[in-house]
């Protein structure tokens, strides 16, 4: 009862035969080898598996790979362009918005979703926009600073943060 | 006061060297590892807390698509027990020994199949018939066995009982703290592969050296034939200090199916399989003079323990060291229950701080003395237990600087006297005296002909920044740019190292790197001993230092040559040296200090709705020399937020009848989210520690300690409600 | 548990036929409830998953006094709708307080109405006693660890909570659910859509197997009404409600001309507080009135040790939201 799906991930086209039970996150990690998207709860509660699907952040542990058929997925591996870090990636590094790094990819994708809708968020808006992403290491403070840093950077150099 | 900051690269807020890997998703965690032919394992766990397995019917599971093996106690080979562990005591009991069930969630089978989906499906088909007996649950259960002074850590000085009997003021209260679960974001994973009799394990561990020793002992193979790899770990907080049964089962499965096997714990399994902070109760008695001098402390700490497991717990470990009090007695109790084994969770002993620092706050109201002043009146100028001078102690500066930054003098002492709109405002504070040891550690440091250095040790970076501080230290000591230093850790084949745990690693590894760097300079001088072409021929270690990629005379920097030139001339690719530290406190003439801190908290309370929100916390910390301010600050902030969780949210709840953990998900076990985080201010004070070769003291845990008391004391200041049980939830404040 | 079949029908009628004919089939929309229950918790088994996410049931249209919301409209889309912001502000508040952005991007309005309880005893197949999962097996939550559980409409057979935030203002507004089945279409007021646990906690609403929610019709508040949604919880965000309340008031000269009030976090179903509304209607907008309404709304609760505190908390939640909406100081 497998199905063939066709989708674009980070701008590249893929066609695979998958079981209907396969979650999008396992498809990304195990079939495509894109292990930057992490799993930390399996129950839609931690946000570590957040990816962009058709331009919006979603939890890839809460979507079947077959549902993504025909769609466009962006993962943390697709955030940098031509080896140049996205301002959010730079911000998380520069502002120390990470420790163990496990929540970071999901945090980045949720931040991307936020900045697409609100290019100049207040700290409070950032805290609420990232509520679905749990972090156990950093205490979040530097994550907020990292997103602010990226927002400034993207305002200053609009081309830097172009979100497809 | 000396603010410890820059000393060349040391202390510089260098961006973490692993940053680019982590922001691009390229850092390889154990769960990311795969191999050709890799198969997947899923655990089957007990659904009762006590009793025996009458029978297991695995036929349907074995017949399910893709299934390679269903391993139970009926078909598993006997496994040896793991070794005694320095620091932590006996290893967790090996799995699948017999048909006895000691806790809900005990691993009773492991199912291996070609795909994760197949293994998950098959695991649900394993039918187990249990003979259930009544579990022993509840910390105050009279049927539970109680261990007294199980670790020999009880302390006594003077005569606490007599001093209490004659004290002008006596305090006697009990405290309770719920069990908590470490819950690093990274689900623990094991990928095991056998190459003949050699075992390679990618393992979520904070201690590769110990994991190797444990697996070698359990599978009865030489240690050299086991390699444990963990270049990156998705957090640990103590959960990765032991080699737990699931890791052993994965290695066993790999051996039996003769394929590489991957097991990733589920989030609910993270609650039952890798330890948790024990539930604790404490009785604390203080005797004091009316002038606020402590004359007696009697502290009994009781913690829960698994039915047959061991866990070194020391609620009152810092009680004797925190204040200058002549009469102190501390007592440790452990209660055996049918629960998954507790283990260390960031800042073990912080429970005792909650009691002591809450009690002093209560005493301050009884005596009419400012809480901060009361602590100063009992300041321990020397280590109270030994009478020796501290190797460093800047707690007084912590109080002073912290109070200043917080604005402690703005506090009006009357309860409920401060408001902002509908919110009651409360100020609270706590002092922190914490432990943390340097542990034996080894490292190998080498320099290659291209002038780059290579630092290798079986240490780990669990997110704390080991890669970065090791890079900075080696660069400074060898006179290199940080870009020229490569640090390789997370591999048990490298030089043995202590765990990322007990606030010990950065200082221990740093001491070893310092030793190795010195030895490496010696090794270069040895190479030059007969080399008349070298300006450094015949020089001794003390004559030289290193800078800008070269060794030169201390007195005359113009006399020297580069590492590259030396290696090239002698046709050497690389020169290496080992280093180690083996700290000996005996005879040092001082008491090795851990970190100290003062915490100041402001809370807001909506009394009608019982809402408690922390508005800000100021932390003034003495952790000796700060190796990297950016990393250090992040450690304190992160731990403070974990302390907020412990204080206001986190509670691992055991179902009273079944012993099942009732809230083993991230939807039900609440850890702080972004919006819970207040304004956090961190300041470092003090001086380099005299006992530490690099002057630093551990700071991975101190950030969690004192948060609970500071918040609870602020709650009292705002509302007049003294809360002695954690977490402080809405129902307690209604 | 076997592999399931995945199908993606092209039209509503085809989807309805497909599920109606197959007792082991289920609709899949946002997936935020269903995939957990099937794949992670393992408490629901399916033979066929019918993906309806691409059916033309997405979108919002405004009539004179109502908003017609396609069942597959996401929570995020509804929250962003200008009419919602302008005329149904407490719906927007409930949406934003109800889920994180990632979930709002996926979760649909129809799915939110049909979400299953978060009770851990229901969601853990190793727990034998759950009348909702296995009718007649008992209720482990009643004697177990209960906090996020219901106190209204609950009974010893089941105290599972309906945790929706969105549905709280929707029941207050008398929203109407439009349903399509193989036999045709029908409409049911949301207040009559849910079924109290009774002896069969597994029956949660009036839908027959295969019936599909196609649209939700939401009456708009009068232009001069004020509304608000208050959610009380331990964490500052991202948590289900311990208690919540949605209120809309039309106040004329200090008198409440028309009140709408509903409660969340306390009911086995989203809870309309009609008796409290009757008390409020025509009464002066003062604290005394609010407290009296709260007392009525929480009459005859069913509590266990872990939920007893919610009775008083819910009353205070009601008082606070009425104060906030009316502008009356406490």
Image: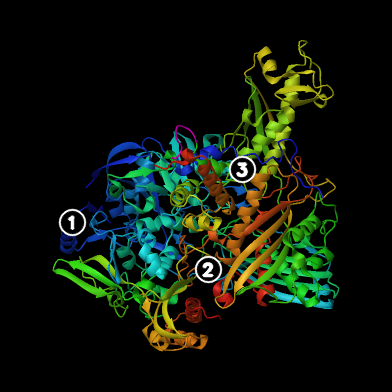
Colouring used for the render: rainbow
For the residues carrying marks 2 and 1, which lies nearer the camera in this image? 1
Query: What x and y, as percent, mark residue A54?
Result: 34, 47
Q: Quadrant of the C terminus of chain B?
A: bottom right
Residue B682 in view in this figure: yes
Does residue B255 appear to the left or right of B175 in the view shown? left
**Residue toward you, A160 or B397:** A160
| First in sequence: mark 2 vs mark 1 | 1
Does residue B247 appear to the left or right of B353 in the view shown? left
Which label belongs to residue C11?
Answer: 1
* Residue at (67% x, 55% y) in the render: B681
Q: Is residue A56 above or below residue B530?
A: below
Q: Which residues are magenta?
A: A79-84
Dividing the picture into quadrants, the one containing residue B46 is bottom left
Which label belongs to residue B465?
Answer: 3
> Judging from the image, what secondary structure is the residue with disc 2 in?
loop
* Residue at (55% x, 71% y) in the render: B138
> Are both tags, 3 and 1, on one chain?
no
Question: Outermost residue, top direction?
Answer: B533
Dividing the picture into quadrants, the one containing residue C15 is bottom left
Query: What x and y, as percent, mark residue C214?
Result: 24, 64
User: What is the magenta segment's predominant secondary structure?
Assistant: loop
Residue at mark 3: chain: B
Query: What x and y, as percent, mark residue B636?
Result: 65, 53
Q: Is residue A83 above or below residue C297?
A: above
Residue B335 in view in this figure: no
**Residue where numbered disc 2 is placed:** C234
Tell me the crowding category of disc 2: few under 14, some 14 to 19, or many 20 or more residues within 10 angstroms, Cα based: many
Tell me the crowding category of disc 3: few under 14, some 14 to 19, or many 20 or more residues within 10 angstroms, Cα based: many
């Amino acid at each position: 009862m497998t199905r063939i799906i066709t989708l674009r991930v980070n701008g590249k086209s893929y066609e695979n035969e998958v079981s209907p039970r396969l979650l999008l996150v396992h498809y990304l990690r195990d079939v495509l080898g894109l292990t930057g998207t992490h799993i930390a709860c399996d129950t839609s509660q931690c946000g570590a598996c957040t990816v962009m699907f058709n331009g919006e952040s979603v939890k890839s542990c809460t979507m079947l790979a077959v549902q993504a058929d025909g769609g466009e997925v962006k993962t943390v591996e697709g955030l940098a362009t031509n080896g140049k870090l996205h301002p959010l990636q730079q911000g998380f590094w520069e502002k120390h918005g990470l420790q163990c790094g496990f929540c970071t990819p999901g945090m980045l994708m949720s931040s991307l979703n936020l900045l697409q809708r609100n290019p100049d968020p207040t700290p409070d808006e950032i805290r609420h926009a990232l509520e679905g992403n749990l972090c156990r290491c950093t205490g979040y403070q530097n994550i907020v600073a990292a997103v602010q840093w990226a927002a400034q950077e993207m305002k200053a150099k609009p081309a830097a943060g172009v979100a497809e | 006061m000396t603010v410890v900051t820059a000393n060349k690269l040391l202390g510089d807020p260098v961006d973490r060297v692993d940053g680019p890997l982590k922001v691009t998703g390229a850092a390889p965690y154990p769960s990311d590892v795969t191999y050709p032919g890799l198969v997947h394992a899923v655990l089957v766990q007990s659904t009762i807390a006590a009793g025996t397995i009458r029978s297991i019917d695995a036929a349907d599971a074995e017949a399910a698509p893709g299934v390679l093996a269903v391993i139970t106690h009926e078909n598993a080979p006997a496994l040896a027990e793991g070794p005694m562990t320095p620091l932590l005591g006996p290893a967790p009991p090996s799995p699948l020994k017999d048909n006895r069930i000691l806790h809900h969630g005990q691993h009773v089978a492991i199912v291996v199949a070609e795909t994760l989906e197949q293994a998950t499906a098959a695991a649900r088909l394993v039918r187990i018939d249990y003979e259930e007996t009544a579990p022993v649950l509840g910390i105050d259960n009279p049927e539970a066995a109680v261990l007294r002074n199980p670790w020999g850590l009880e302390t006594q000085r003077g005569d606490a009982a007599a001093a209490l009997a004659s004290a002008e003021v006596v305090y006697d209260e009990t405290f309770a703290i719920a069990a908590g679960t470490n819950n690093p974001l990274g689900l623990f994973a094991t990928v095991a592969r056998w190459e003949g009799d050699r075992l390679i394990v990618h393992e979520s561990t904070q201690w590769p050296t110990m994991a190797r020793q444990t697996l070698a002992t359990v599978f009865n193979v030489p240690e050299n034939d086991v390699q444990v790899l963990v270049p990156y770990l998705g957090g640990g907080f103590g959960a990765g200090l032991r080699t737990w049964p699931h890791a052993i089962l994965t290695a066993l499965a790999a051996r039996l199916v003769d394929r590489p096997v991957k097991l990733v714990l589920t989030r609910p399994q993270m609650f039952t399989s890798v330890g948790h902070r024990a539930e604790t109760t404490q009785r604390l008695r203080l005797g004091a003079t009316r002038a606020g001098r402590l004359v007696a402390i009697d502290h009994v700490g009781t913690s829960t323990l698994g039915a047959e497991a061991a866990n070194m717990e020391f609620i009152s470990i810092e009680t004797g060291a925190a204040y200058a009090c002549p009469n102190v007695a501390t007592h440790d109790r452990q209660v055996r229950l049918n629960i998954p084994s507790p283990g260390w969770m960031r800042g073990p002993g912080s429970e005792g701080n909650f009691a002591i620092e809450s009690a002093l706050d209560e005493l301050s109201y009884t005596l009419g003395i400012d809480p901060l002043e009361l602590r100063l009146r009992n300041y321990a100028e020397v280590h109270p237990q030994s009478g020796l001078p501290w190797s460093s102690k800047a707690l007084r500066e912590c109080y002073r600087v912290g109070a200043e930054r917080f604005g402690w003098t703005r506090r009006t002492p009357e309860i409920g006297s401060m408001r902002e709109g509908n919110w009651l405002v409360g100020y609270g504070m706590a002092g922190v005296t914490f432990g943390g040891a340097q542990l034996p550690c080894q490292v190998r440091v080498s320099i290659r002909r291209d002038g780059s250095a290579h630092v290798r040790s079986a240490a780990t970076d669990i997110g704390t920044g080991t890669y970065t501080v090791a890079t900075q230290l080696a660069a400074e000591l060898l006179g290199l740019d940080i870009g020229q230093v490569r640090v390789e850790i997370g591999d048990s084949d490298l030089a043995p190292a202590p765990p990322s745990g007990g606030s010990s690693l950065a200082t221990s590894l740093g001491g070893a790197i310092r030793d190795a760097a010195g030895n490496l300079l010696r090794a270069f001088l040895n190479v030059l001993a007969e080399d008349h072409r070298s300006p450094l021929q015949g020089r001794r270690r003390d004559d030289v230092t290193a800078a800008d990629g070269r060794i030169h005379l201390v007195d005359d920097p113009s006399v020297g040559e580069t590492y590259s030139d030396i290696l090239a001339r002698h046709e050497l690719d690389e020169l290496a040296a080992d280093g180690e530290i083996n700290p000996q406190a005996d005879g040092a003439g001082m008491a090795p200090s851990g970190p100290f801190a003062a915490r100041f908290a402001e809370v807001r309370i909506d009394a009608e709705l019982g809402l408690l929100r922390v508005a800000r916390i100021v932390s003034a910390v003495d952790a000796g020399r700060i190796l990297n301010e950016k990393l250090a600050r992040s450690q304190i902030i992160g731990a403070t937020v974990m302390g907020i969780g412990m204080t206001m949210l986190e509670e691992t709840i055991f179902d009273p009848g079944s012993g099942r953990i009732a809230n083993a998900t991230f939807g039900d076990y609440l850890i702080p989210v972004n919006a819970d985080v207040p304004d956090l201010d961190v300041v470092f004070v003090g001086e380099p520690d005299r006992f530490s070769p690099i002057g630093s003291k551990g700071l991975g845990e101190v950030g969690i300690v004192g948060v609970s008391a500071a918040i609870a004391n602020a709650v009292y200041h705002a509302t007049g409600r003294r809360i002695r049980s954690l977490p402080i939830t809405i129902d307690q404040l209604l | 548990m076997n592999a399931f079949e995945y199908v993606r029908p092209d039209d509503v009628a085809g989807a309805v036929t497909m599920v109606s004919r197959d007792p082991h089939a289920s609709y899949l929309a946002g997936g935020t409830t269903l995939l957990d229950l099937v794949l992670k918790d393992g408490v629901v088994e399916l033979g066929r998953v019918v993906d309806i996410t691409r059916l033309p049931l997405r979108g919002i249209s405004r009539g004179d006094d109502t908003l017609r919301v396609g069942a597959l409209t996401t929570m995020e889309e509804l929250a962003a709708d200008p009419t919602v912001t302008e005329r149904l502000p407490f719906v927007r508040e409930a949406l934003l307080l109800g889920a994180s952005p990632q979930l709002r991007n996926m979760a649909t309005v129809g799915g939110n109405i049909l979400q299953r309880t978060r009770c851990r005893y229901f969601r853990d197949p190793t727990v034998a006693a759950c009348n909702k999962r296995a009718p007649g097996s008992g209720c482990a939550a009643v004697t177990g660890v209960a906090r996020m559980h219901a106190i209204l409409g609950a009974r010893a057979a089941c105290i599972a909570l309906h945790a929706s935030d969105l549905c709280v203002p929707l029941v207050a507004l008398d929203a109407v659910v439009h349903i399509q089945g193989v036999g045709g279409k029908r409409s049911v007021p949301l207040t009559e859509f849910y079924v109290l646990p009774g002896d069969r906690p597994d029956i949660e609403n009036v839908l027959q197997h295969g019936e599909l929610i196609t649209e939700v019709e939401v009456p708009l508040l009068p232009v001069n009404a004020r509304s608000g949604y208050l959610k009380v919880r331990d964490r500052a965000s991202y948590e289900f409600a311990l208690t919540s309340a949605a209120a809309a008031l039309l106040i004329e000269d200090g008198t409440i001309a028309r009140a709408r009030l509903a409660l969340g976090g306390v009911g086995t179903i989203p809870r309309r507080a009609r008796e409290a509304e009757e008390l409020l209607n025509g009464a002066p907008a003062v604290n005394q009135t609010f407290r009296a309404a709260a007392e009525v709304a929480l009459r005859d609760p069913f509590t266990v040790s872990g939920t007893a505190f919610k009775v008083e908390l819910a009353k205070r939640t009601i008082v606070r939201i009425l104060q906030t909406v009316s502008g009356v100081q406490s």
